[in-house]
Image: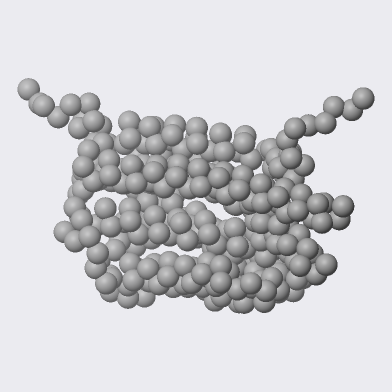
Amino acid sequence: MSEVGFFGRIGLTGFVLAAYLVTWVVVIGYTLYLRARVRRAAEAVEAETARMERGRT
Amino acid sequence: MAIASTEPAARSATRRRFAWLNWVGGIGFAAFLASQIFGIATSPPEIGMGHLQKIMYVHLPVVWNGFIAIFIVLVMSTVYLFTRREKHDLLAASAAEIGTVLIGLTLVVGSIWAKPTWGVWWTWDPRLTSTAVLFVIFVGYLALRAFTEDIDRRARWSAAVGILGALNVPIVYMSVRWWRTIHQVQSSPSTVDPSYVLSLRANAIAFLILLIYFIGRRYQAAVLERERERLAEEAALR
């Protein structure tokens, strides 16, 4: 009886698995990076605006 | 009495403007996952390389969308040089960053595919070399933007580099026909076996939705970062 298992039967082993994992890591990692960058940029705008308001008063 | 939001104004304003991105991102991720499962589950092993063929469903969508991103850089940079509108510069910069990530990912996934099929992780083949050159040019584009402080100069210079860099894409695409290479000729739904066409198309379209999401999100960050730069300049002039 074959011992290849489920992932072996569908061909998701070794190099194929590595290619898919790398792609998903980059896609998810880049998404998280973009969300963090948007949040940081919005906070920086708020901080700059607050600084200007303080300067005016 | 008006109820004031506790969320800062800039954040809530851009969040409303780019709220549609949450939907695009959700649909993109779901479509990409579904199309990959469909491709893995339904594709028969290829005669020559067996199950390694399945790498095609990530390698080709990634590189095609990388080329689309760089094409957007070309269009937006050209339009910027004529109109000098900030929006076009920011869109070009956003597309350039995503293009660089996708071309880099193409090189990595291609390398993973090369090892079991060609026996090497890397070879100085015309297709691989021209793709690496494209990647390095756009890393240079991003470095140029990062290290140029003057906003106008940064936009003009990066538009020029973006246009010149994008002209490398046809060279990458045609390299497999112009020079002797171990890389196969261009793959498309018309050149692959019919049993792989639907999965390939589904994966490519799903990744296109992700590309729209990435460019939109990166553009949102660019708009906010430009706003902060403008405020800082304004404060410095007082």
Q: Nearer the viewer, residue B95 or B44?
A: B95
Q: Quadrant of residue B235?
A: bottom right
Instruction: Please tell me which residue is depicted at 27% across the width and 72% down the height of the picture.
Output: B124
Q: Image check: B207 left or right of B181? A: right
Q: Nearer the viewer, residue B49 or A32?
A: A32
Q: Position of residue B62 (x, y in %)?
A: 43, 52
Q: Position of residue B130 (x, y in %)?
A: 38, 71
Residue B44 in view here: yes
Instruction: Please tell me which residue is depicted at 89% across the width and 28% down the height of the picture.
Output: B2
Q: Residue furthest left?
A: A1
Color style of the picture = one colour
Instruction: Please tell me which residue is depicted at 48% across the width and 72% down the height of the picture.
Output: B140
Q: Quadrant of residue A10?
A: top left
Q: Nearer the viewer, residue B109 or B230?
A: B230
Compared with residue B220, is residue B196 higher up or lower down, i.e. above or below?
above
Q: Position of residue B27 (x, y in %)?
A: 56, 34
- Which image quarter is the C terminus of chain B in? bottom right
- Which image quarter is the N terminus of chain B in? top right
Q: Position of residue B133 (x, y in %)?
A: 40, 72
Q: Image check: A30 left or right of B58? A: right
Compared with residue B11, is residue B223 higher up or lower down, i.e. above or below?
below
Instruction: Please tell me which residue is depicted at 40% across the width and 59% down the height of the picture.
Output: B104
Q: Residue furthest top?
A: A1
Compared with residue B178, is residue A44 higher up or lower down, i.e. above or below?
above
